[in-house]
Amino acid sequence: MNFDLKTLDLAGAAAEKCDLLVLLVPEGFVAGEDALSALVAQASKAKDFETKPGKSLQLYQAPGVAARRVVLAGVGKGDGRSVRQALGSVAPVLRGASVKRAVLCLAGKALPETLAAMVHNVASASYVYTTTKPKAEARTLARVVVGVSDSSALAQAFDISVAVVAGVETAREWGNRPANHATPTLLSEAAKELARHPGVQCKVLGPAQVARLGMGAFMAVARGSEEELRFIELRYNGAAKTQPPVVLVGKGITFDTGGISIKPAPEMDEMKFDMCGAASVLGVFRALAELQPSINVVGLIPACENMPDGRSVKPGDVVTSMSGQTIEVLNTDAEGRLVLCDALTYAARFKPAAVVDIATLTGACVIALGGVRSGLFATDDALADALHRAGEAADDLCWRMPLDDDYAEGLKTHFADVGNVAGRPAGAISAAKFLQRFVGEFPWAHLDIAGTAWKGGANKGATGRPVGLLVHYLLGAATPAAPRARARKALVRAA
Ligand code: BES
Ligand code: MN
Ligand code: ZN
């Protein structure tokens, strides 16, 4: 999908030839002399339209308007959430087969936050999963002109938003792929594809190299699968070599059956989403490739399946992690922390400025925070604050959780340095406490995205979160200079 930013007043918007014009109307809208103002004024007077978010009115071949269809949509205060609600309610129209070219216009002054919400939500409302669905059903919306009163002031916010959209769509598409179309090997090939962009490099390790590194915890998870594991190392170099990188670590369990501690059958298909942390890392690199900011970033993805088999790791088995710590695998379904702990040990070699891992780690986090906020755990207050703020800015929210040592009590065992599970209470926190044991001398944060990475039910699918949060965090960590966006018109491709 192609985005363009344009300065448009309402008269200009009325003159835009397109299949669909979506006019976002904030509360307190002041009508002008143009045709669109007249429509809004008349419809409001007749109580056919309100500026409350979620309220909308559709018109066909409206007088004085060049667009074939017009939707008036209320956006209340024009904040991220309101724009999300407004465009969510217009989603069926945006996905319509007749809409190729759309104009999205705000009837008022746009803040960078409003513009970002416009770009993100028009993209997410029109996204259609394609990998294993016939082309005929693919997204028809090809071009979106975003109209604002002053485009020059918003150019940078626009470039960032368009790059985030590309990243989110990469993450959604990979997240949505069924496990037989998103194997560890296929993930590593996607990472190698990303390395075709300037500044991006990729290295992929297979079973022999991972064994040489001594990643016994990661290898234990992969044992039961016919699919070979992959350890993916992406690098984005936008700053001097001497500048320490931020390392992102994404959980890449391409399917989680639970292993010998097998999961119940209902909804087990959703465990294809257990690589959404990895998908978010791919998405972030897609956005970095677009923006070319002056920072260094490393992306690490331990990727494998968790399967039951005659060779599988068994409850009670003790394995030796890359750190040298022994782990009693009391529950083979607590596999995410096993693949992540070796990746965290590996991360130390980059002498990182910070390490952030992203994982669909615990059902307990879904119970704690639901699908609204990701769980945030951090050993460093400055890092926690930066991630929290990035989440607010990107409308990709998270919430900090505690890491008191008392939460690690349940991980103690007689048979190894640590067990891989504690009891059911505070399960998201004890998982984080397990990971913390493997963190070296660097600020570390952990994002548990089990509740936010995908939606179940009728709208089942990956959300692309927390790509927005991570990109905003990384750009905040960049030297204040504006990111060197390569082109105003950015081509957004899924995967
Ligand atoms: N991938 C799951 C976590 C998960 C479960 C995410 C449901 C979203 C929805 C993870 O590998 C897992 O199975 N965790 C266990 C840990 C337990 C055995 C301590 C869980 O949360 O039940
Ligand atoms: Mn599991
Ligand atoms: Zn899992």
Image (tube, grey):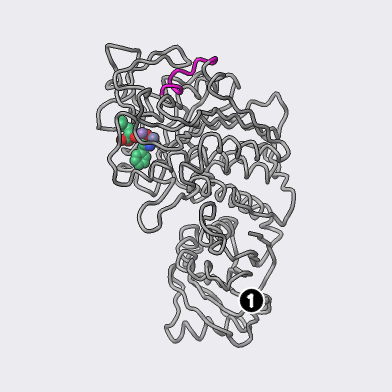
- Of 134 and 300, the residue lying toward us: 134
- Establish if 441 lies above or below 286: above
In the image, 87: left or right of 363?
right
Is residue 55 located in the magenta-colored stretch of the structure? no
**Residue on which the image places disc 1:** 10
Which residues make up the magenta segment?
A: 212-220
In the image, 180: left or right of 269?
right
**What residue sits 70% from the left and 45% below the top?**
482
**What residue sits 50% from the left and 24% below the top?**
343
Dividing the picture into quadrants, the one containing residue 1 is bottom right
Give residue 92's position: percent from left, percent from top. Answer: 48, 68
**What residue sits 72% from the left and 48% below the top?**
485
- Establish if 300 lies above or below 216: below
Give residue 101's position: percent from left, percent from top. Answer: 63, 69
Predominant SS of the magenta segment: helix
What's the amino acid at mark 1? Leu
- Of 291 and 306, the residue lying toward us: 306
**What residue sits 68% from the left and 79% below the top?**
15
Q: Secondary structure at mark 1?
A: helix
Classify mark 1: residues with Cα within 10 Å, few (<14), some (14-19) or many (20+).
many
